[in-house]
Image (cartoon, helix red, strand yellow):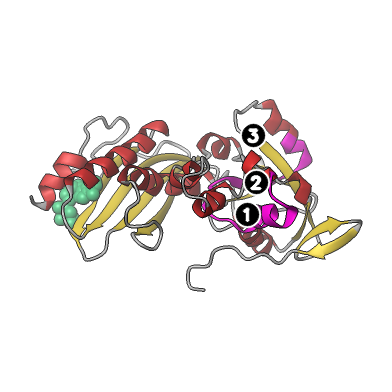
Amino acid sequence: MAEFSIIDTYFNRKNQDSVDLGVGDDSALLTPPPHQQLVICADTLVAGRHFPLDTNPHAIGWKSVAVNLSDIAAMGATPHSILLALSLPQIDHAWLKGFSQGLYDCCDQFGVRLIGGDTTQSPHLTLSVTALGWVDTGLAVPRSGAQIGDLICVSGTVGDAAFGLKHLGHDLQKRLDYPTPRCVLGAALKGLANSMIDVSDGLAQDLGHILKASNVGAKLQLENLPLSTALHALNDEQKWQYALAGGDDYELCFTISPQNYEKLLQKQLDDSISIIGTIQQQRGLTFEKDGVDHLLQFNGYQHFA
Ligand code: ADP
Ligand code: MG
């Protein structure tokens, strides 16, 4: 079966509203909505590196889209479409069926279309997704905008995916395999949050990117970290290790002024949001214990470590 037959069988669904030209030509065509900026990102998953070779293909399809939609959400933007670059060692129809179903399930859940890509043969199974989205011009939320006095917030619960990876078969493995990009919350934060990042490499490391880009420091209240029941049962050291250093949660971490936090609450979104600290002038990531400030030294995931 040739490349074109794979594309036609698995990656060429026709329902393509708001796409001028999708899969089938040399490039796709979109008309940008008025007064919007294009937001674009890419993420690659390599089999054996980012997921075990025997991972359920449906979960791989879901996750390859979800991690990109999370990056779009972390800009305060709304995702619109994706492109898929697929390198396959061989044609495995059961795998392609599961993978494409997972990919489209995630697309459908978040109103996103697959508008093109590339399909090649290679010794390693590699999936690269590019996501496109729109945001009102000037309202995207960068990492660099944190202000002294901002509240530091995080959505959902943190540490679940790392716990799920350590305890395969536990309920929390779902959080590892099927992360939920916080698309509604991300878009709701445009023009409200001062800075934002999605938690992919661990909360401490990812918040660290905000602090560095914004030239500020932070003080965390560790007891306010939002944890699932399974993590609550652990001792403090273990739970904070998961919550601060565990990657792959795809929650949003953002900083926001107290006034805008009130406006956010008025939007009555479904997502749970926890205030976990404040932005301060003094550099570094600190937390208070028994009235004394301590410097946090957790490391998240580093690709070339
Ligand atoms: P070209 O040779 O001009 O790069 P291709 O033959 O690679 O075009 O692809 C044909 C069409 O199929 C293009 O519209 C491309 O975007 C689309 N396509 C190729 N692979 C994929 C894929 N894995 N998922 C979605 N669309 C794909
Ligand atoms: Mg090609």
Front residue of 139/49: it is 49
Please report the bounds of the magenta region as a residue range. 233-261
Label 2 amino acid? Answer: Leu
- Residue 260 among those drawn in magenta: yes
Indicate which disc residue 272 carries: 3
Label 2–label 3 contact, CB within 8 A: no
Label 3 amino acid? Answer: Ser
**Residue 108 in the image: x percent, y percent?**
36, 32
Indicate which disc residue 303 carries: none
In the picture, residue 242 is in which quadrant?
A: bottom right
Q: Which quarter is ligand 2 in? A: bottom left
**Residue 293 in the image: x percent, y percent?**
86, 61
What residue is disc 1 on?
Answer: 242
**Residue 87 in the image: x percent, y percent?**
24, 58
- Residue 104 among those drawn in magenta: no
Q: CA distance from mark 2 to mark 3?
A: 17 Å
